[in-house]
């Protein structure tokens, strides 16, 4: 049985990595069932844009907001779990890109939640430029800061590069008599158009990516999660869930493989750009 479970976990890890490139924007606004990941940690996002809910006796914490058009799905998912959207007390983000933060201002307005953002991403979150939330940040976070509510504690780890304030959230989740380390990766991706060498707007971007991977490689990870469902094989793992069966979201091997794969991809692109300074990723 142990051999079978190991093989199953390995298969899911390979599938998750293989699906990274296949994750499509077509899934960004598609409804997805709310999922109990473990303990009081839930997935309440769309088929690819991840939102996480931590339910506590003192209210809810949300990580990410997606776009305003996704809010009806978010409210529906929270209600299906038996919780109240308006009980949201704290709002966090993975990084300051519209697919994760565009709706933070609306969520603040509707729930009264306090918005907390890593320092380098505060300015773009508060910006009123086209496509930006223009939302007031209530607490500025720094690497290693903790966010606590109702007995649950999250730690903000600065994993910059994708954005200067890209944040990976970690927490320890009590689940069925055991405690699991959850890692919600902000993003280690080098997107199309990113300039790693000769970037005048973000001169230290390559060094920040190096720091990002140094942090990610050292984090203990039982529950492998991220800002997009495609990072960790959301669909495949949801399909693999069975009553009384092993939790497919417990995937330390998948986490290790994912981080190594992304680190190698970054290094390859960085070396290419060193030979072609100012040349964006194609």
Image (spheres, rainbow, N blue to C red):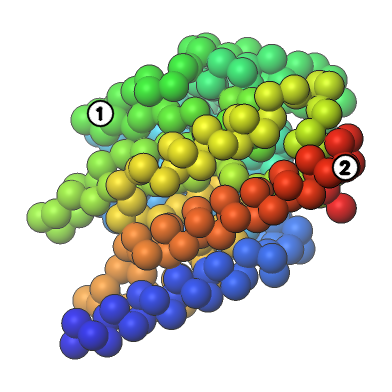
- Work out which quarter of the rendered image holds the N terminus and state it: bottom left
| Relative side of 220 to 66, left or right | left
Residue shown at the point (51%, 50%) measured from the top left = 226
Residue 145 appears anywhere in the view: yes
| Picture quadrant of residue 32 | bottom right
Q: Which residue is mark 2?
A: 276
Query: Which percent across, then down, holds residue 2?
Result: 19, 82
First in sequence, mark 1 or 2: give its number: 1
Residue shown at the point (50%, 53%) measured from the top left = 259
Which SS class for mark 1?
loop
Which SS class for mark 2?
loop
Calculate the distance from the C-alpha at mark 1 to the C-alpha at mark 2.
Answer: 51 Å
Question: Residue 150 shows which numbered tag?
Answer: 1
Packing grade of label 1 (10 A; few <14, some 14-19, many >=20) is few
Q: Is residue 122 above or below residue 234?
A: above
| Picture quadrant of residue 160 | top right
Query: Which percent across, then down, holds residue 272?
Result: 79, 49
């Amino acid at each position: 049985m142990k051999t079978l479970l190991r093989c199953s976990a390995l298969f899911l890890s390979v599938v998750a990595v293989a699906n990274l490139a296949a994750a499509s924007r077509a899934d960004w606004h598609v409804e997805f069932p709310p999922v109990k990941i473990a303990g009081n940690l839930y997935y309440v996002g769309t088929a690819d844009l991840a939102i996480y809910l931590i339910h506590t006796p003192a209210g809810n914490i949300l990580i990410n907001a997606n776009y305003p058009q996704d809010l009806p799905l978010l409210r529906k998912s929270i209600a299906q779990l038996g919780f109240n959207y308006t009980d949201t007390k704290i709002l966090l983000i993975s990084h300051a890109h519209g697919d994760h933060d565009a709706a933070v201002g609306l969520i603040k307005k509707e729930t009264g939640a306090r918005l907390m953002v890593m320092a380098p991403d505060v300015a773009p979150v508060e910006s009123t430029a086209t496509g930006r939330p223009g939302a007031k940040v209530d607490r500025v976070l720094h690497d290693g800061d903790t966010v606590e509510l109702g007995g649950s504690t999250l730690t903000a780890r600065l994993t910059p590069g994708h954005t200067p304030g890209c944040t990976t959230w970690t927490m320890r989740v009590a689940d069925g008599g055991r405690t699991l380390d959850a890692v919600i990766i902000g993003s280690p991706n080098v997107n199309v158009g990113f300039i790693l060498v000769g970037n005048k707007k973000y001169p230290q971007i390559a060094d920040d990516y190096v720091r990002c991977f140094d942090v990610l490689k050292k984090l203990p990870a039982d529950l492998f999660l991220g800002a997009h469902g495609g990072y960790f094989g959301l669909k495949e793992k949801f399909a693999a869930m069975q009553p009384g069966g092993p939790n497919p979201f417990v995937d330390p091997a998948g986490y290790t493989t994912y981080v190594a794969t992304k680190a190698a991809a970054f290094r390859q692109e960085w070396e290419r750009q060193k030979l072609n300074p100012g040349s964006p990723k194609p």
